[in-house]
Amino acid sequence: MKDRVLLKQLPNLLTLLNMVLGLVVVLALVWRGPGYRLGACALILLAGGVDALDGKLARLWDVESDFGKQLDSFADLVSFGLAPVLLTLTHPEVRALGWPSYASLGLYVLAGAFRLARFNLGDFRDYFLGLPITAAGIILVLVNLLLHYSPILELGWGVAALSGLVLLLAALMASRVAVKRPW
């Protein structure tokens, strides 16, 4: 009996681990800034793996719950919304652009929150409505890795292209495009 209770809570514990990874990224980037950029990328990607595992286990063990769904959305907003935005802001060129960068990154977080709220209120078993914030966050992390190792942001169009990509990700998250679940 006690084992079943622990088994039922394991997906929620993994969800909390996802959130802890996102919080570590946020706090480390605030504290250490660009010096933690690569570590932040690794932790966000790890959070993506944990996020996939928690949902898969909940479905496999038939322990899905409304509580778990809500908790997962809060964790995803931290790990794939806020953390990738702060990671992007570690690039001085992004901050130098000023309000266009901040506006696009702010819209990204808002679109992510909107998409998560819509998901929590619907029944999307076979598909997602809009690009999942986890996918958007991982795309933004991979772009940050590219930016870390290349001079793209030093080019005249680099920061504008990044802002355009961030706005595209925000639009896809808020869209009504059906995205088939990979499982």
Image (tube, rainbow, N blue to C red):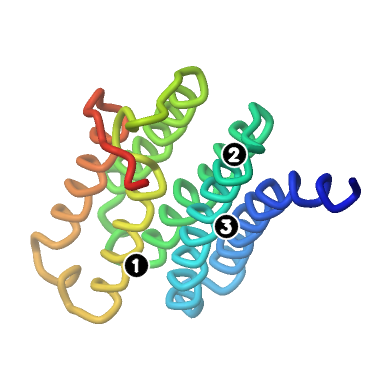
- Closest to the observer, 131 or 9: 9
Answer whether labels 3 and 2 touch (C-beta < 8 Å).
no
Image depth: mark 1 or mark 3 in front: 3
* Residue in view at x 63 percent, y 64 percent: 24
Q: Is residue 172 left or right of residue 49?
A: left
Which residue lies under the disc numbered 2?
74
* Residue in view at x 55 percent, y 41 percent: 59
Q: Residues within 10 Å of mark 3 (few under 14, many from 20)?
A: many
Q: Which mark is residue 91?
A: 1
Going by the numbered disc 3, the residue's amino acid type is Gly
- Closest to the observer, 147 or 100: 147
Quick check: 75 above or below 142?
Answer: above
Q: Position of residue 55 (x, y in %)?
A: 54, 46
- Closest to the observer, 104 or 110: 110
Q: Is residue 134 left or right of residue 153?
A: right
What is the spatial separation of the Cα atoms under label 3 and label 2, in whole angstroms?
A: 11 Å
Which residue lies under the disc numbered 3?
22
Q: Is residue 104 left or right of residue 80?
A: left
Q: Secondary structure at mark 2?
A: helix
Q: Position of residue 144 (x, y in %)?
A: 31, 67
